[in-house]
Image (cartoon, helix red, strand yellow):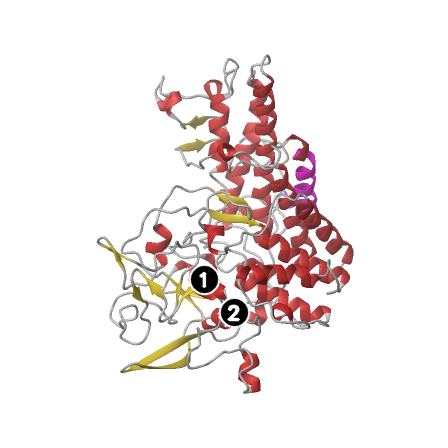
Amino acid sequence: MINYKHPLFGLAFTAMVFTACQKMEDRPLEKITEEYLWDSKDSLGTNASYFLNDIYGDLPTGYNRIDGNLLDAATDDAVPSADNTAISRFTNGGYSPLVNDDNSWNANYTSIRKCNLFVQNFPKVNLKKSDPAIFIQGQYWKAENRFLRAIFYYELIKRYGGVPLLGDRVLTANDDLRLPRNSFDDCVNYIVSECDAIIADLRPDPIPAGEYGRITKSIALTLKAKALVLAASPLNNAGNDFGKWRKAKNALADVIRTGVYSLEPSFANVFLVRKNNEVILAYQRALTFDVETNNAPVGYVNGTTASRGRTSPTQELVDAFPTIKGLPITSDLKSGANPTGYDGNNPYANRDPRLGLTVFYNGARWLNREVETFNGGRDRPGTAIIETKTGYYMRKFMADFSNGTAYSNQTHNFPIFRYADILLLFAEAKNEVDGPGTGADSVYTYLRAIRARAGIQAGTAPNTYGLPNGLTAGQMREFIRNERRVELAFEEQRFWDLRRWKIAEQVYNKSLHGMRINRSGTTLSYQIETLSIPFQFFAPRMYRYAIPFSEISKNINLVQNEGYQ
């Protein structure tokens, strides 16, 4: 298994210092030079492989990465439990060319520079020509490096739109650095062409356990498909060009047709089993229980450390989960006949099983007791400690400690690409191109597969898994969007989905809500309450990040995004 590490690493225009492993300890670390790193006598490419592993460490990861908060705390799915956190700038319009706590521009261009240094210098390494396995390994490394460069560009265009494309160049202080932005479509075409170019040279699937985490052919197909979906979505496809949706649909079908991936039988195991059939690409992390201590309810203590409860899911997210029959809870609220089993006086019973694996609610079992988020409960004491603002805490990604007494180390790889996302994106693209359809290859098939794995009851036609036949394309679009919301919660999907669908201005400019629970004896009463938290979206400005002022000020050819000064 590859480990993504972050050794001390510095890059300048004219010199490079690299430290990666004990194998380099034959000279002082500050004396490691380019000549030593790209050693023509290093016939196994050992030093170059350490350099590449360092680039792997720059892949995106999502747990509590912005001032201790998840990016989803900047959507309608959650709010930060603490006041005055940096994540709040994403919901009050506070990020700007001078302030952005998700500074992807500098981070990704630094990573792209590393990739280009690899492209430039790896040919100097004379791999052992008498050993075909070593030669093939070198081909893999070159292709992996190009993939990594492509995904760093993908991370940039999600945030900024079109950005300058550098190709293979490693710019120096002597070069003209006043590069203009390439168009968004130029950037997408570059990512797609890079993926197409390297697929033949990447490792085949399935990858051996010892190499898990490295880039394979199917992972490159997935990045290509994700980039084409981004290009087809309303934010980047104002004319609703169906040709773009068709390209995305075909690319997603290519991923599905590989047959490499499938839905894990257990939704929980997707995030707890290091190598499974559903995760396509994940950021590889050491075994930890930091997700638990950062996000579990505040009344629980692991040793001497209290859980911090940083993430407070909203009532909006909780209400998005259907009933065990797959029907919206509003079906009961409107009919009064209670056909789905939803009960407002017992709101968490008879619900989609994913709810209990995504959100801690009052009465859920954890560390050998029930969660208490009623007023004055151990997990909402109403004292000076930071606690839930909504009556909920994030549960997703955590192991089953319902009857344990303390946390233990677990696999907490962060999912970058997973198969459920691909199936939902395929359903989305297919719906835009062909409509919902009927039969074995209809949009219904893919949504029902997701819901079946979730544990929703099948029911009977024409309402199988709560998905009624005869939906229009518009109605199906809303079903798909809600299914993405509940299936992919807290995976850094909702933030970007709201933008690519270009509906953020409708979603954000509303009040968010939580649940206030009062207990009298053994009786609980539930009251939805409005949160006094600014939740604003200024269109069109906030659909893109601002290019950092430091870049704009030194490059007259770099045009700022709309709405920023």
Residue behind mark 2: 321
- Of the pair 234 and 463, the residue shown nearer to us: 463
Instruction: Name the amino acid type tagged 2.
Output: Phe
Helix, strand or loop at mark 1: helix
Q: Of helix, strand and loop, which mostly describes the magenta segment?
A: helix
Q: Is residue 370 left or right of residue 555?
A: left
Q: CA–CA distance between discs 1 and 2?
A: 10 Å
Callout 1 environment at 10 Å: few (<14), some (14 to 19), or many (20+)? many
Q: Tell me if 504 is positioned left or right of 89 in this view.
A: right
Label 2 SS: loop
| Residue 358 numbered tag | 1
Q: Position of residue 77 (x, y in %)?
A: 48, 66
Query: Residue at the spot x=62%, y=43% of the render?
Result: 260
What residue range appears in magenta? 180-198
Residue 195 pos. (x, y %): 66, 39
Indicate the amino acid at tag 1.
Thr
Q: Nearer the viewer, residue 180 or 459?
A: 459
Q: Is residue 183 visible?
A: no
492 shown above or below 502: above
Mark with earlier residue (1, 2): 2
The residue lying at 58 percent from left, 62 percent from top is 452
Q: Is residue 73 visible?
A: yes
The x, y position of residue 385, in whole percent, is 26, 66
Mark 1 in CB contact with mark 2 (< 8 angstroms)? yes
